[in-house]
Amino acid sequence: MHLLLCLATVAGALSTRIAGEGVYRQPEAKSALTAKVEIGGAPANATTFDGVTSVIPIRGGVVGGSFFQGNLVANLSSSAERVLPGSNGGKTEVETRWVLEDGKGQRILANMHGMTTYANEALHGFGVARLMTDVDQYSWVSWETFSVEWTGEYYTGTAEFEVFSLASGGRRDGKPIKALLPPPGKAQ
């Protein structure tokens, strides 16, 4: 009886440890695009019920990656930031819309949403990105999941972004994720 109680306690502790670590392994991230962004002139600020919102023009930039080489289209790309209440200006919510164009004039729309931290005359942010296009060679990006990270320093007029393609790291218990399996009868 004592052995059963001991085994039950160990099993309970192990299941709590496993449950405490979550259901899924860390997602796999692979660099998809990098961008050196040229920020335009002064932002246009507006005070709203949500606080101060700024729209920052983008003058352009160079975009590269394993599948895409091109530029940000100036005047069509911009970033809107809202200072988060209680952050004393140190944190903003960011929505960015870029138009990426390759050498053939083919375009990808990139929508990004995240948070930026400002300190030490510099900035750093994380967010999610959604890429969309109907151009055949790039259309696969419309169904991918992306994260984005960025940095910049004051008075430089530039910021660096990196977009990562995300894939599931799988379940911790080793069970398959049915929605990610090939359809029945199809080879992987």
Image: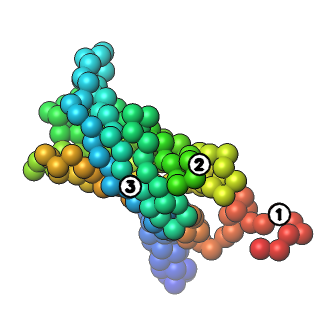
Q: Position of residue 66 (x, y in %)?
A: 51, 68
- Work out how far the residue at label 3 is from the one at label 1, CA to CA, in angstroms: 39 Å
Residue in view at x 55 percent, y 69 percent: 169
Which residue does the image show at 52% across and 53% down from the upper left? 102
Total numbered badges shown on the rendered structure: 3
Image quadrant where one finds the C terminus = bottom right
Question: x, y percentage for residue 82?
Answer: 29, 30
Which disc number belongs to residue 183?
1
In the rendered structure, the answer to whether residue 38 lies left or right of residue 109 reads left
The quadrant of the picture occupied by the N terminus is bottom right
Q: Residue at x 27, y 37 (%)?
A: 40
Q: Which residue is mark 3?
A: 62
Q: Earlier in the sequence, mark 3 or mark 1?
A: 3
Q: What kind of residue is marked 2?
A: Gln
Which x, y percent locates residue 9?
A: 47, 73
* Residue denoted by label 2: 106
Q: Earlier in the sequence, mark 2 or mark 3?
A: 3
104 to 53, vertically: above or below: below
Which residue is nearer to you in this view: 174 or 124?
Answer: 124
Tell me the element at label 2: loop
